[in-house]
Structure formats: structure tokens, C-alpha cells
Image: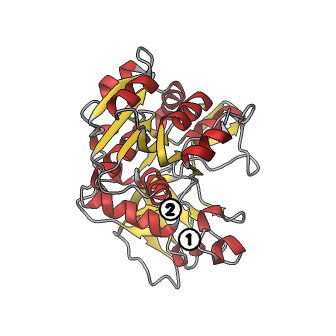
Amino acid sequence: MKKAVLRGPGRLEVVEMDVPECPDGGVVVKVGACAVCGTDVENFLHGQRMSQLPPDLGHELTGVVSEVGNGNHHFTAGDRVALNQSVPCGECMDCENGYENLCDHTTRIGGGFAEYIPIPALAVQSGNLLKIPDDLSFRDGTHAEALAAVVNSHELIDVKLGDTVLVIGAGAVGCLHCQLAKAEGASRVILSDINAERLNMINELSGADLIIDSSTEDIEARVKAETSGQGVDRVIVACSSGVAQEQALRMVAKRGTVSMFGFTHKEWPWIKFDSNDCHYREFFVTGAFAYSRKQFKMALDLLARGVVKTEELNTHVFTLDQMVEALETMKQGAGLKVLVVN
């Protein structure tokens, strides 16, 4: 079989190797599609952060069970599945309190940029490998992880019927935020970005009621004008920008909530925060990191029922032999979702 192997920062090879042996209690999955994540790009450029080389890149994957290990009673060959890569320890205080997304002892499974991947018994027994229906494509199923993180964010900020929601950042994840907010009953969804080309691309895909090109328009003035000076009920910063986070704090309504969904650059993660403004207007600010297994399952259900639509978000599709090109495309921010298929 073929597999993409990272030899060092910026050095990736697609090599031939044997199909992996099936773990006891686990399965082997024939990969149908695997999405390129931002962490894959970071590891490609700078080397794996959390393990020794060679690392296993690729974790947003779907496929078909090709082999079942001894003692596995959960799956049979031919089952269509999606992988939730994050297996919490289940024993720490965070896990016990129901915050498994914050577990510091999470086991992460990678290796999706290959024709086959072994899934250990730990992941199977923990419910991290889920069956998907025949009418959910492998390509659309790869959005489950991103959508699960979006679900987590929306549960934290509690989007309500009639809310006005602003999403800053018009990538694939920004579109997922918009679609979910509409499904939750938001009366108006506003989407903004500084990339006019991307805004034109997603005009129909996001489901937003209003799109603002903040490279040519004062987003704060426009949002205040659109809300009679009140600001928006929920602001989701779905991009890695401290400037956008600061703007969000100024555009949220009294008693509203800001979700810092995107992280900022580690070299300078600080932003200006007017604590008096927060004090007098009583708005709330929360982070949003990863997701739980329950939220991953919910995301798959939303995709399977067509509540959130992702087919047109899959703008770039590559083969394993084009792996470097796929990573470079993601790095350049071209398109929306970048997939590698077999």
C-alpha cells in the first residue's frame, strides 16, 4: 500500500509498504478520504510537535472496515466508518467532570494519509470509530471533526431562537458556523472576512443573510448600523486574528457572548481588552477548544441528515501521490476544504 511519511520539516515521501496488521480488538480501515488539517500543515513545515519522527499525518478520515481483529464485536468488514481521532483518558478530573475535550492525557490517532490505517482496540472500545450511513459520502464525512468543534462552540455560547450572530472568518469552518446558527434558529447571520475572493466563493454556501468585506468596509460601523446600534447577540471569531478578536469585543451586544473559536499566533497571543466595557455591558467571552465524543456523534448526525451541507465546501481534491501539493494548497489558503482521496 501507499502511505505519506514525513521524514523531517518540509520533507515528505509517499512510500510503498505492507498493509498494517490488524490489532487485537481493533480494525483495519481502507481510507476513502482524509481532509488536510491546519495541524498537518504545521507538522509538515516544522516537524511533529508531540511525537518522534516519522509521525503519522492525517486524522480527519472516513473509509471502510477491511479487517476485524480478534475480540472485536463492534464492527464487521464492509462497515462504512468515520474516525474521531481524540481518545480521552477517562480518568482525570476533566474527564470525570464531562470536559473530555480538555483532557491533558488524550491519545490521538493519525495516519490517514495512506491507503489503509490500523485502528487500535482503545479507540474502538472508547467509541471513537463510528459507523456512517450509505448516503453520507466519504468526502462529506471528513467534515465531522470540524463540525463537532463548531457544535462545542455553539453549546458554549448558547445560540438561541431569534439571535443575531456574527461570524468573522469565511473559511470552511466559518460556513459551518453560519449553517449551524441558522439551523438553531438565529434570525440573522452575518459573515465577514478580509478576503474578497473567498467571500465571493462562499456567497451561496454559507447561508449567511449578510456578507461584509471588511477589507473595504468598516465592519464595526456596518454591524452597528445593521443592529440599530445595539451590536450582535453572538460573535464567533473563526480566524486566527487578534485584531478580529478585539473587534468582536466592541461589536457584541449587552449581555451577548463572544466565542474565541480561532487561536492567535503563539509568538504574540495578547489582545487589548477593555475590562470596563465588559463590566458595564455585562458581555461574556469564552474559548472553544476541540469537542467531545458526544459532539462528534452529533456532528455526524447533522451531516447525515443534511442539516449542514458540505459537498460544495470540498474545493480541492488530491490523490496520495499529490500529497505535497495538497499540503501546499492548504498552506496558501486557496479554496476551502482540501481532501486526499483513494
Tell me, for residue 123, which label it has, or none. Answer: 1
Q: Are marks 1 and 2 in contact (CB under 8 Å)?
A: yes
Question: What amino acid is at disc 2?
Answer: Asn
Q: Position of residue 238 (x, y in %)?
A: 49, 39
**Vertical relation: 150 (above or below) 5:** below
Return the mark for residue 84: 2
Q: Residue furthest top?
A: 216
Q: Secondary structure at mark 1?
A: helix
Q: CA distance from mark 1 to mark 2?
A: 8 Å
In the rendered image, which quarter is residue 303 located in?
bottom left
Task: Tell me residue 323's x, y (percent).
Answer: 51, 35
Q: Nearer the viewer, mark 1 or mark 2?
A: 2
Q: Residue at x 61, y 39 (%)?
A: 277
Residue 175 is drawn in which quadrant? top left
Q: Tell me residue 54's x, y (percent).
A: 70, 46
Disc 1 marks which amino acid?
A: Ala
Q: Is residue 63 left or right of residue 17?
A: left
* Nearer the observer, 169 or 141: 169
